[in-house]
Amino acid sequence: MTDTTTPAAGGNEPMRAVITNYGHLSGDTNSVPDDLKPFAQQVLDMDPIKDVPSAVVDNTGVRPMKLQASALPDDMKHAVLDKLHRIPREMRDGAEDRLVREVLTANRAQMRLKIGLSQDALPYHAEQVDIARQAQELTRKRNWYAEQVGRVSGFKTVEDPATGDLRPVDVPLLSDPKRAAYREQITDLDRQIRLLVNPDGSYGIEGQRRMREALVESATRLRKVELQRSEEAEARQMAANINRQARVKRRAESYARMNADDVG
């Protein structure tokens, strides 16, 4: 029976590889058509944080922008401010920017999920974010139900039938039918989570299917881009050849006129 008083597989553990190590999951091109395999491998070789654009673009130019804790989510902001307050006031110049950058680096996967991706991101990386977000939301709901099932309104004293001693027993806050209904919800949410991600952080059956489809779509897009680049390069080369032939033709015509004058 599923433990309904604690988060499944250690809280956020089902999303360990999907979120904490977002972008560093192993993949393969086995399900990709042969003509797309080189492009699929390009996708798998990309770092989804370093190589994939965020939805937020730094438009500050070459001048470095000083980061402030006030721009962070509350949990990260408080962590930065706690550290900042421990630094002597005369040594705080630049410390806030440094601490903010440190927390952003440490939580870059979580920040990427909150910020989102650029519209130019490949479907493969967009699907990674979608699955991670869905797994987070399902786990949040699951944990809420588990918390409600575990709530108590107090305790009562009962006699232990084996020893005759009196001992305190928790009195659940919810009725038995309500707790049973919540347990059913927990079981269903656990199932939905496992379809997306396994307890070890790898993708579940549904997650694998979605990632395979996204990989093929991404590889197809890269092949199209490569074809367009190839055609553009070929067109430029052809244009250069046409211009060269035109120059040669004009020069040849000039020589022909001079030769005609000489013959005359």
Image: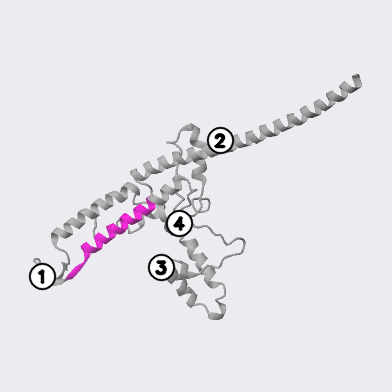
Residue that badge 2 annotates: 227
Question: From the viewer's perspective, is the residue at label 1 or at label 2 nearer?
Answer: 2
Q: Is residue 6 visible?
A: no
* Alpha carbon distance from label 4 to label 1: 52 Å
Which quarter of the figure is the C terminus placed in?
top right
Residue that badge 1 annotates: 158
Asked if the residue at tag 2 contacts the one at tag 1, i.e. Cβ–Cβ closer than 8 Å, the answer is: no
Q: Residue at x 31, y 49 (%)?
A: 194
* Alpha carbon distance from label 1 to label 2: 77 Å
Left or right, 165 with respect to 31, comes to left
Element type where label 2 sits in the image: helix
Nearest the camera: 13 or 31? Answer: 31
Asked if the residue at tag 1 contacts the one at tag 4, i.e. Cβ–Cβ closer than 8 Å, the answer is: no
- Badge 1: residue crowd in 10 Å (few <14, some 14–19, many ≥20): few
Label whose residue precedes the other's in the sequence (1 or 2): 1
* Alpha carbon distance from label 3 to label 4: 16 Å
Left or right, 161 with respect to 41, comes to left
Q: Residue at x 46, y 73 (%)?
A: 81
